[in-house]
Structures are given as structure tokens and as C-alpha cells.
Image (tube, rainbow, N blue to C red):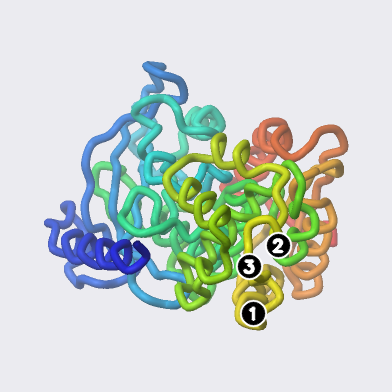
Amino acid sequence: MRVRTRVLACVAALVLSSAVPAAGASAQAGRPGDLVSAERSAFHPLPGQPTATRAWRIHYRSTSATGAPNVVSGTVIVPQDGRTGPRPLITYAVGTVGLGDSCAPSAGFPRGTTMEASLIQQLTWRGWAVVVTDYEGLGTPGEHTYTAGSSAGHAMLDAARAAIQLPEAGLGADTPVGIMGYSQGGQAAGWAAELHSSYAPELRVKGTAAGGVPARLAGLVPVHDGSYGSGLLFMAAAGQDAAYPELELDSYLNAAGKALIGLFRNNCVAVDTTVGSFKRISDLTVRNPLETPQWRARLAESDLGRTAPGHPVYLYHALADELIPYSQGTGLRADWCAGGAAVDWRTIVVGEHVSGVITESPRAADWLADRFAGKPVSGDC
């Protein structure tokens, strides 16, 4: 099954690479961020809800966690507000939606079923364009590389590049860019912030707003093993295995583990977390992969904090976060501050993981608005 999946992914990449690029796409094929294709779509936070926007589903070139070229899908959303001058662009990464292609944000926007769409709509109300990556393996053949940090960071930065290439979006090389995400999206945003200077320095990134960030994956294992959030742990294992096939997850799984991971690969987060809750690693494996050097090394590759972002960051975390402990956020803050980054830190005193993105999103957007307006920030390290 794994071999067949990889063959399908290769075939799809060849097909997409031969597609006729949208007008204005780079004439030099194969560069990260090149726009491969674009088609009209729709953006609805709720089924049928009007938003005064235009939307396009795009495919664009990016880079996997191992440095290989790939193709990722996403959605570009532009307000229809009569504005003719330049506008900011937010490259946005959603929190965990699942591993199946039907979970991709681009699949849900036309139907009004994508989580966080109401928060994205608040950004368009400000007159900002938004591009939302589907991440590697969601919306395109192959498996979703859930929690593989560099893959997600590449996908966010390349989504911004692709949106700027889309003529209908009305953006340009001088477009100011903001990076935004929470939870899985916070990890992606953190990686995009760390990679920006080396991977996409031409993007005029004014700031990154990231919340509920899983900065150290290994530190989350004891939190979720056997808890109601254990489904997330096994989803992460499947995502790491998709990013790094040499990990050979199936060789560690017993029959129950193979069945569960197989279910995860074709469903979305509500099903996955419900069915996967209160299970231990020992329930699903013949031996624990996390006790091997290969698995520990690959997990560590997704750790944040090694490179301080070269632009301002708004970092926030709920004190009572039950899924990603508060210490993950404070640790990342300390690492970035030690590297010289300008970090504005906020503790969400009341609330937990899910409520954190809802209550803090307007404040994070206000912070980005100040960066677009050129207001100075020194951070509070």
C-alpha cells in the first residue's frame, strides 16, 4: 500500500508539472513557489455564506522535509472591496484538520465546512488577501506529512510566492506579507518564520503571529500517550512516517495499530481524535518506535528555536493549554529571545487550547496590522 501511494504521488507530480501554468507564472519551471495551476473556487465560512471575496484553488511548487521538490495545493482569497492599490497578504496555516484529502482547507472552503474560516474572514474584512496552504499531502496525492516542520514552513512561504504570481489577486513583489497560524498552524508559522531569511528572502515579511505552538514534539509524547488526545500522537507518527519513509512505521505496529493508522489516513480530525483517544503506544505496537535513534532524530528535526526569526514575532499561548503545554510556548520564546529576535509574548490567562485561537485571533491580527503600518516593535524579551 505504501509503495502504491508513493507511485501515485510521483505520477500526480508529473501530471501537475505538465499542467499549463496560470498566466504570469514563472517561465522557469521547477522553482519553489512557482504557480503550477489556478482555478476559480469559492470561500464560505459557513455553507452558502456570502463573503464579498474571490477565491482560487492553486497548485504550486514547494519543498519536502527532505529537500525534494513537490507540489502543494492551497487557496488564494481576495476581498472584493473596490480597492485598486496594494494590499497586504497573509499566508495562513490552519490547525489540525486530519490526514485525509477531504480534510484539506481548499476542499471545505466552497462548502463552508473548513475550520478557522470565520477567523480567516476577519482578515479579509481588513482588506487583506489571504493564502491558505493545504500542506504537503493534503489535497494532492500522497500522504500528509503532519507535524514535519520544515515541510510545513516551506509550504507557507511558497504559498505566498504563488499568490503573488497570480495576476487576478492583484499582488506584486512589493506586497507586505504576514505569517499566521495556531497549533499545527503555529508550528508551520514558526518554521516559516525561521526559514524566511534563508529560503524566501525576497518576501517582504513584516511579522509572524503564532500561537499554541508545538515547539518540541518529543515533549508531547508523555502528555498524549494514553490520554484523550492520544489520537494526535498517532496521527503525528503517521505524518512523520509520510515525511520520512525510512522510518517504516508499519513495521512497529501490531494489527490494531495498523488498522487505526489506516483509518486515520482516510479521515479527518473529529473521527481520528475520537477513535484514537485513550490509547497507549504499547497498545498498538510490537515495539516502541520512539525508543529508536532513527525516530528520535527525525522528531528532533522538527524542533523549533534553533534559528531566531529576522522579523518581529507575536507569540501567544494559553496558560491552561491541555494539548500543548504552556512550557512549549515559553521555551520557544526563550530560544528566540536568546537568538536576538524581537518577540512580543502574550499569556492567555483564561481558556485552553481550542479557545485560544478564537479569543486571541483579533489581537494577533491587530498586531500584524501595526507591522503593516510600519509601527516599531522591540519585543518584550
The circle drawn on residue 138 is none
Q: Position of residue 289 (x, y in %)?
A: 64, 71
What element does badge 1 sit on?
Answer: helix
At horizontal 51% and vertical 45% (from top left) the residue drawn is 98
The circle drawn on residue 286 is 3
- The earlier-in-sequence mark between 3 and 2 is 2
Residue furthest front as drawn: 255
At horizontal 75% and vertical 58% (from top left) the residue drawn is 220
The residue identified by callout 2 is 215
Q: Please tell me which residue lies in front, 365 or 137.
A: 137
Amino acid carrying mark 2 in the image: Ala
Residue 201, can we see it? no
- The earlier-in-sequence mark between 2 and 1 is 2
| Occupied quadrant, residue 358 | top right
Characterize the local packing of mark 1: few (<14), some (14-19) or many (20 or more) Cα atoms within 10 angstroms: few
What element does badge 3 sit on?
Answer: loop
| Occupied quadrant, residue 78 | top left
What element does badge 2 sit on?
Answer: loop
The residue identified by callout 1 is 297
Residue 170, can we see it? yes
Q: Position of residue 63 (x, y in %)?
A: 40, 70
